[in-house]
Image: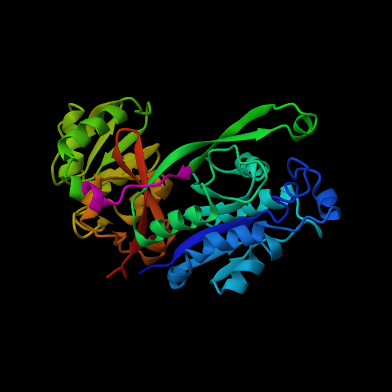
Amino acid sequence: MSTFHMGLIINPLAGLGGPAALKGSDGVAGEALARGAEPRAAARTRLALECLLPLAGRIEFLTFPGPMGADLLAEMGFAHRVSGQLQGAATCAEDTHEAVRALQDAGVALILFAGGDGTARDVSSVIREGQPVLGIPAGVKIHSGVYAISPRAAGELARRLVEGGLVRLASGEVRDLDEAALREGRVAARWYGELTVPEEGHFMQHVKQGGVESEELVLVDLADWLAGTWEEGVRYVFGPGSTLHGLAANLGLETTLLGVDVIENGAVLARDVTEAQLFELVAEHPARLLVTAIGGQGHIIGRGNQQISPRVLRAIGLDHLRVVATKRKLGTLEGRPLLVDSGDPDLDAAFPDAVRVWAGYKEELLYPLGWGDGA
């Protein structure tokens, strides 16, 4: 089982203003400490991480020094790497900004961050679009829709992702109150943006027990979604398999069942291409890659689609890869990760620890990814 790389950022000042009756902690942490408030963010984060202790051997954290994560991870015995350095003795918003940049540059599958609405604002100000994050509630104000309902709920959701449970991605609003106005008795909230967050996902056993998912209807829904989101001038590479063949059919396109086809501006540009033809089509042109998983086995690269070679993957970009699979198909994996075996071990290792899976109309899941030995 491959290692799951997860980011952790703790705002050690979060929550200080609550016990001190300061209606928040932004800009008043020193006053809160003077009034006897004690830091609580690390303790709240510990509650979340306790859910991950049984999986500690499968996780490597990337974090920031000292109270922003490294101290707690070392104390709890988690494998971790430390990046960056603190700006000063007391942490500040710029520390959070630098931590977010470092963690997403390292390609972590999920960034856990502990704080309140002010921390969520700091994260959203520098995060890249689509980077999954999850808030551990540790602040005074928790109005943003990017936090779990409790620290343990955050840990449980992260645990499910590491274990291979289906975790749906959604957009969560970042909102914050004007603390100065709040201290004067006025409530004034602002919208500051949105973050990509995991939601409570459906495990496949639930679908199997209910027996309600129809693959045919799911493909109709997916076709409706894709038809409304085609990017003009972008070439879409459809990998082989019945899932993508059925998706194309619902778009009114004739593709090959076992071949690789290229679609541009809603029409088939090239059908059943070779590796050389595919590379020529995507090497100097914006492209997106759609692949599906082999049911029960989980390979998305390297089994039946060798036309999608390492140089093709590099030309398209791993961030432009999307897996198309119904929850029923993912359920045949029984929690095992999706797999890549491109024949290039360095490229395989560059894949993210979790990939986005299109599973229904405007429904994206985050699912673990692993790789073989390249043989």
For the residue pair 344 and 11, the one nearer the viewer reads as 11
The quarter of the rendered structure image containing the N terminus is bottom left
The quadrant in which residue 144 appears is top right
Q: Is residue 129 magenta?
A: no
Question: Where does residue 168 sit, x and y in percent of width and height?
Answer: 38, 44
**Residue 189, image quadrant:** top right
Queried whether the magenta region covers residue 199, the answer comes back as: yes
Residue 267 x, y percent position in the rendering: 24, 27
The percent coordinates of residue 365 (x first, y second) are: 36, 45
Q: Which residues are magenta?
A: 197-207
- x%, y% of residue 212? 18, 40
Q: Quadrant of the C terminus?
A: bottom left
Position of residue 52 in the picture relative to residue 19 (left or right):
left
Side of 211 relative to 29 (left or right): left
Query: Residue placed at 62% from the left, 73% from the top?
Result: 75
Q: Which one is nearer the viewer's eye here, 179 or 373?
A: 179
**The one of 100 and 27 positioned closer to us in this rendering:** 27
For the point 66% across and 56% down, the residue is 41
Report the colour scheme: rainbow
Give the residue displayed 21% in from the left and 50% down from the top.
329
Q: Residue 307: tell me if it is visible.
A: no
